[in-house]
Amino acid sequence: MFAIFFLGLIACALSLLLTPVVRQIFFTLGIVDHPDGERKLHARAVPRAGGLPIAISYAGSIAIAMMVLPQGSHLAVHHAPIFVWLFAAAALILFTGLVDDAVGMRPLPKLAMQLVAAAIACYGGVRIMALAGQPISPWLGVPLTLFWIVACTNALNLIDGLDGLATGVGLFATLTALTAACLGDNIGLALAMAPLAGALLGFLRYNFNPASVFLGDSGSLTVGFLLGCFAVIWCQKAATLLGMAAPIISLLIPLMDVSMSVARRFLSNRPIFAADGRHMHHRLLARGLSPRAVALVLYTACAAAAVLSLLDSVLSRQLGGAVVVIAVLLAGAGIRFLAYDEFDIARRIAMNRGFRRAVGEQLCLRRFERGIAQALTLEECWPPIRDLCYDLNFQAVRLFSPTRVFGEGDASGPASPAETQAPALWRLEIALVPNLSLILHRQCDERDKLPGMGFIRIIQQSLEGKTAVRRQLSEPKRAKALAAVMGS
């Protein structure tokens, strides 16, 4: 127990001493984060120097303990080969983060480096070996492990948008795992977690609001990677059906943030890797909280998650299921409180038969594509177009070409019965292709939503692909004569 305390204390002292030195070096080299007034709200340029002092403090505390403590020569026994591979992988992540902080990296190469590092750790023995208490084959365990480690790595990186936030979240998760390791007599994990907790605590002194140094990608990626790997080692010692639940709950806040970011961008049809200003800390700032208050609110949430995680770890057989249910309910309440428009719109669509309406519209488009595939002339194209518009609940449809008007009446003629019966109408005029336009009328009924206008593009593409139709539109005199002959 003394060795664990000593490791944490030395790592904290080293972090307190090294952080100002590395901060000044990074500031001199120009590796700083500049404010932009949108996502980056700090007032001045701040060095992104967190990775190096945390990594040096971590490794230095272990080296000092091995030299100073009487039992120091036995520490390596607990740091088995699994940790050697793990720390080699963490070094690769640290290097990736430093490169990203210094010159920048595109998302895909950075993700590739994370996968390589996760594969190294997995090869060394950091692997999910069971689900729901049942052993699983490496063919399933390895992909799950890679996904979990990469998710944790990016989770802490994405939440690093406020002074002291990612550092504090990582510290709470580290202390949770450290406490669980001590309670579970997992000495190797405890010895690995203690210096990380000390290093983060020392760094937080300079990183809390107002921060004079940031974690940077080198710090957030490295800490997230280590936490993901240590969580797998934690669950390897669990002998319960919900062995992975405790590590997940301990990282609930950053995992929620990364999951919501992916879901939001998917629902809004935005690139998954695109940065935005809608993370949970941004939402809390938008509600009027100060940056310091937001950090403290999320620290409180992390503390609650830590308590639930420890309850699940220690009393899993008695309370495991209840703890998981409580964690899920609290997470749902938090998401609802943050009031993301994407989730609200998706819920409204699901509740208001929007999904069924979308399926119905797609079926109409499939029928239209099959019907128009055989059409050669503009006259043959008109029935599928008319039927599609009526299937989409338009009350009147007219198609105008240089020589003919398809539909009810003409451009200046009287309104159709469908038009006069409606109390109010939308009138939509769309230029489909040169010399060809479509006019649609639809009732202004609040209960009947206007369908997505993607069907217009499908009609355009269908007509553009018809050689005979293009010839008709480009030669109106010939088409008019042909129409006269057919009429006679």
Image (spheres, rainbow, N blue to C red):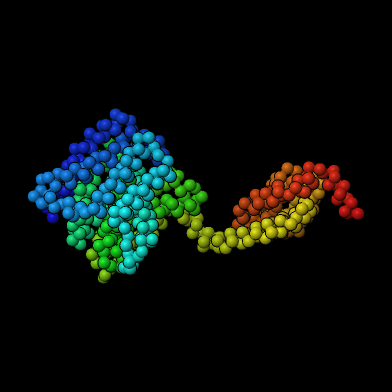
Q: Position of residue 387 (x, y in %)?
A: 71, 59
Q: Position of residue 128 (x, y in %)?
A: 32, 60
Q: Is residue 291 above or below residue 135?
A: above
Q: Is residue 298 visible?
A: no
How many numbered dots are placed on residues in this image? 0
Q: Quadrant of the C terminus?
A: bottom right
Tell which of 415 and 395 is nearer to you: 395
Which residue does the image show at 30% across and 42% down from the upper left? 94
Which residue does the image show at 83% across and 47% down from the upper left? 479
User: Residue placed farthest to the right in the image?
Assistant: 488
Q: Is residue 241 above or below residue 332?
A: below
Tell which of 286 and 360 is nearer to you: 360
Which residue does the image show at 42% across and 41% down from the upper left? 106
Q: Position of residue 302 (x, y in %)?
A: 29, 54
Q: Quadrant of the N terminus?
A: bottom left
Horizontal placement of 479 versus 369: left or right? right
Q: Position of residue 65 (x, y in %)?
A: 14, 47
Q: Is residue 87 visible?
A: yes
**Could you say which quadrant of the image residue 11 lies in?**
top left
Tell which of 114 and 418 is nearer to you: 114
User: Residue placed farthest to the top in the image?
Assistant: 28
Horizontal placement of 330 versus 406: left or right? left
Q: Is residue 164 above or below residue 409?
A: above
Which residue does the image show at 65% across and 58% down from the upper left? 365
**Could you say which quadrant of the image residue 41 lies in?**
top left
User: Residue placed farthest to the bottom in the image?
Assistant: 318
